[in-house]
Image (cartoon, rainbow, N blue to C red):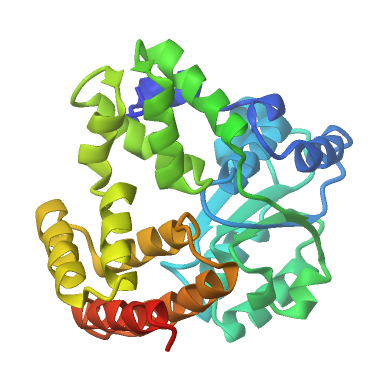
Amino acid sequence: MVNGSDVWTEKYRPQKFDEVVGQDEIVKRVKSLVNSVNLPHLLFAGPAGVGKSTLALIVVKQLFGPSWRENYLELNASDERGIEVVRQKVKDFARTRALGNVPFKVIFLDEADALTREAQQALRRTMENFTSTCRFILSCNYSSRIIDPIQSRCVIFRFKLLEKKDIKTRIDFISQNEGLNVTQEGFDVLYDASEGDCRRVINLLQATASISPNITPDLVGTIISQAKPSDIKVVLEYALAGDFVNAREKLLDIMLKESISGEDVIKAIQKEVWNLPIDNELKVKLTEKTGEAEFRIVEGSDAFIQLEALLAAFVLAGEGK
């Protein structure tokens, strides 16, 4: 199924533009460029798991057909981010002519925002010198990290997070071909855990399906190791009621039993704060405190100590201090 096997990949991996979901306007514009064989350099910017790499692959397959492998080079810039990669691999591939009727090859640089500034400057020069024989497709999460000279040479497409209905389309497609039974409740849990990242949804579905073809909320819950909203709600209610000791013990119990990291707990708290029956002004204040705690955890502070401090802040906020 979604197991990455060659059979599944060749048979079911999206090969046509209309199989990319949730990015209709981008697909329409890219398709027109490909049909005219007048492809400029492209910059795909947006969050992870929304179809950037897939669309780049479809572009190449539509352009070159069966000979796409000979005319396509894919590099992950987060692994190979130095200037030598641009000077050697990229330049060596770019200077040779394409095979077939299309007059250029395509180089796809994934996670291009991880390239050093020196490497980006070298890439800018390469894009200038080999435009007649090569086109570049750059993919990144943050276009602001790409230097202006490269951005000005590219047509920029900004991808958005996929909506629930778009991810449902892909999950239904996989379920039908793999004989899976995904309940609506099970899909809801999958989607909530993904936060719009289709790749994460598919990976979770694969892991869950390895246990049982019947995808239920409880089964998905055993895979994602995510704090239950009801448990987090109890912790917050204890804290806002001024009962720091019980809030702390309940939180520790959740983290130990469910093997949940501090960052995952923070995200669960951020979501649950807005479901509490409290004033909006207090919700904003608690969200600010949660953001401060998350920053410290990300920077390397002890997760449980920061969560304890956060609960203490919630206790004081509940008392109006």
Q: x, y (%) of residue 213?
A: 27, 17
Q: x, y (%) of residue 202?
A: 41, 35
User: Residue visible at 69% across and 44% down?
Assistant: 98
User: Residue visible at 43% across and 26% down?
Assistant: 9
Task: Please say if 33 is above or below 237.
Answer: above
Q: Quadrant of the N terminus?
A: top left
Q: x, y (%) of residue 178?
A: 37, 14
Which of 175/125 is in front? 175
Q: Is residue 25 visible?
A: yes
| Residue found farthest to the bottom | 321
Which of 67/244 is in front? 244
Which of 34/248 is in front? 248
> Quick check: 94 left or right of 253?
right
> Quick check: 116 left or right of 137?
left
Write down the quadrant of residue 308 in the picture: bottom left
User: Residue visible at 64% across and 32% down?
Assistant: 20
User: Residue visible at 55% across and 38% down?
Assistant: 69
Q: Is residue 228 visible?
A: no
